[in-house]
Amino acid sequence: MDGMGMDDFISKAGAMRGKKQCALCDPDGISNVLNHIREDLIIKSKDRTHSQHAAIVGHSNLPTAPIKKAKREEILAVVALSYEAEGSIEKRWLMTRRPKQGLLAGQWEFPNTCVWSSADGNDKKSKKKKSNKDSVVELPSITVKKKQTAVNELIGKFSASSIDGQWLDKSITHIFSHVRHTMYIQHGKSLTIEDPRSRVSAFTSDNMEYRWMAESDMKNVGITSGVKKVLAAVKDACTTQQQSTARKAGKRIKRER
């Protein structure tokens, strides 16, 4: 056992963990770790029970978790279009359905399009930084023009037009198991030639299923936490905008008096 005591061994293991390695990765690592566990189990502190001592010995000698691959980064342009039919008490939102296979298969979400992905590997502006946890990708800056072009093309698929479209002040991040979405969201009211009150699905020319849904409909079909996050942010922005408009109207009335 090369004369290494427990303190020296833990110190070495800690240093190796900082390099994303573990004691088992050494040549003869498994036999060395087992020998140290046997040796350390004999030397028990008086203020510990046998089970406490065994747990401490085991955790101090066994390796850290495997190195995690960096999550794929994607920048999305998201459209949150709403429609308020005359006499209706519920606002409806344009929702699309994900493909039947792949990530979150069949789930409903706000229309979106990917404007950049780290998986493409051809963007020179993106850089990778190494951290103690995993590699971090610096996201490139996406111009408003590029985002708006993507949104306009997306809206065109649904025979709908957005009025008073506004971008949220900040992007929203949502993490799935292996992909991190940074979402830039445009919200606004929609004019459409179709009847958005219908609960029947329609399809775009490229066979994307979509439907106008009230929040009660969303609860029935089930939506992801990412969709709930977008919806909450848009509703907060609309409330803030309404409050600002009301304050300005109040000030104008006072001045006219």
Image (cartoon, grey):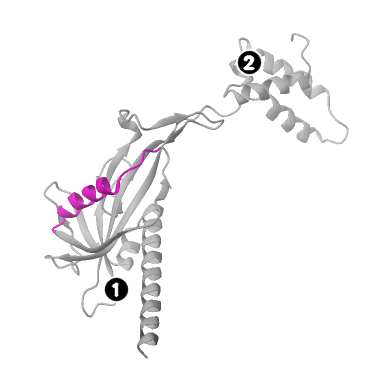
**SS for dot 1:** loop
Q: Earlier in the sequence, mark 2 or mark 1?
A: 2
- Residue drawn at 61 percent across, 26 percent down: 18
Marks 2,1: beta carbons within 8 A: no
- Identify which residue is drawn at 16% across, 60% down: 160
Q: Nearer the viewer, residue 140 or 51?
A: 140
Which quarter of the image is occupied by the C terminus? bottom left
Quadrant in which residue 19 is drawn: top right
Q: Which residue is mark 2?
A: 30
Q: In the image, is 208 to the left or to the right of 33?
A: left
Res 243 → quadrant: bottom left
Which secondary structure type mostly characterizes the magenta part of the structure? helix
- Give the labeled residue for mark 1: 90
Q: Is residue 27 above or below residue 17?
A: above
Amino acid type at circle 1 is Glu
Q: Which mark is residue 168?
A: none
- Which contiguous range is marked in magenta? 139-159
